[in-house]
Amino acid sequence: MAKNFWSNVNKVITDSDLVMMVLDARIPELTLNHEIEKKIMKLNKNIIFIINKCDLIDKKHAEEIKKSIPNSVFISTKKHFGATILKKKIMHFASKKQSNDDVEIRNRSLIVAVVGYPNTGKSSVINMLAGKGKTKTSSYAGYTKGLQKVRISPKVMLFDSPGVISFENKDKIKQVILGSLNPANLEDIDLYAYELIKYLNEIIQIHYFDSFDKNLDDENLLIKISEKFNYKKKGNEFDINKASEKLILDWQKGKINMVVCDVLDKSEDF
């Protein structure tokens, strides 16, 4: 990662009282940056893991996340779910700060840093908390420029970290899975589709075919998707590249979800 990126991250974390790391509920471990987590712990900062896009998982997956990632809050910025619970968590830390022996710390706002990988919904989380769309959002990575401060209450100030957690060059597959690379611009797009299938074979099959065949290999799954949508090249050959692009785009846009066992009860406090 770039040197200036880490300099910005260190400053934001150092200046904050609380750090909120935004994760994708479908792939929380993949969107959890352990290096930044270590920096937060080293500086003895409070941390909340925001599990965004919780409308795309079922209760079974939610329970697994709760066990593996303590101090997590489940939200869906798209469905406007979880804002009240998250605000209560934040205000808990704001109230706790009021008992600090240092008068200067006690009298200033709680400073909350927000960090996250591209396409996890970092800016959308801030907008949901602010309630006034103060941070512009886009589906493309890197839209947030510089450090933005957003006041969500007289006692709480959010710091939108400069940009988002950046990637190493070797993380191209992760960029595709997280939706920060347009599949239309990829060479050998089928290789990226195979990686996605490796993570989510059963989910993908259920999404497209309402069934799961454990004996269906990656290539034949793409052929089956090509057949379903009539993707063919000249000569009537199935177009695996077009099927790969369809698969990746459907995943990036949240059309492929993990709600395969239960319907998420939006009224339930995770």
Image (cartoon, rainbow, N blue to C red):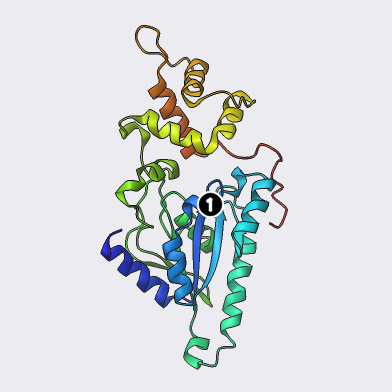
Res 17 seen here: yes
Residue at (31%, 58%) from the top-left corner?
1
Foreground residue among 253 and 153: 253
Res 82 seen here: no
The answer to whether residue 261 is left or right of residue 213 is right
Mark 1 neighbour class, 10 Å CA radius: few under 14, some 14 to 19, many 20 or more: some
Residue at (65%, 52%) from the top-left corner?
64
Is 167 located above or below residue 256 in the figure?
A: below
Res 75 → quadrant: bottom right
Foreground residue among 192 and 51: 192
The answer to whether residue 202 is left or right of residue 119 is right
Give the total number of marks visible in the rendering: 1
Image coordinates of residue 265 in percent, x first then y, are: 72, 47
Is 236 located above or below residue 8 in the figure?
A: above
Res 50 → quadrant: bottom right
Q: Secondary structure at mark 1?
A: helix
**Image quarter of the C terminus:** bottom right
Residue at (41%, 21%) from the top-left corner?
240
Image coordinates of residue 107 in percent, x first then y, are: 51, 87
Image coordinates of residue 147 in percent, x first then y, are: 35, 66
Q: What residue is disc 1 on? A: 28
Image coordinates of residue 71 in percent, x first then y, are: 61, 65
Residue at (58%, 51%) from the top-left corner?
76
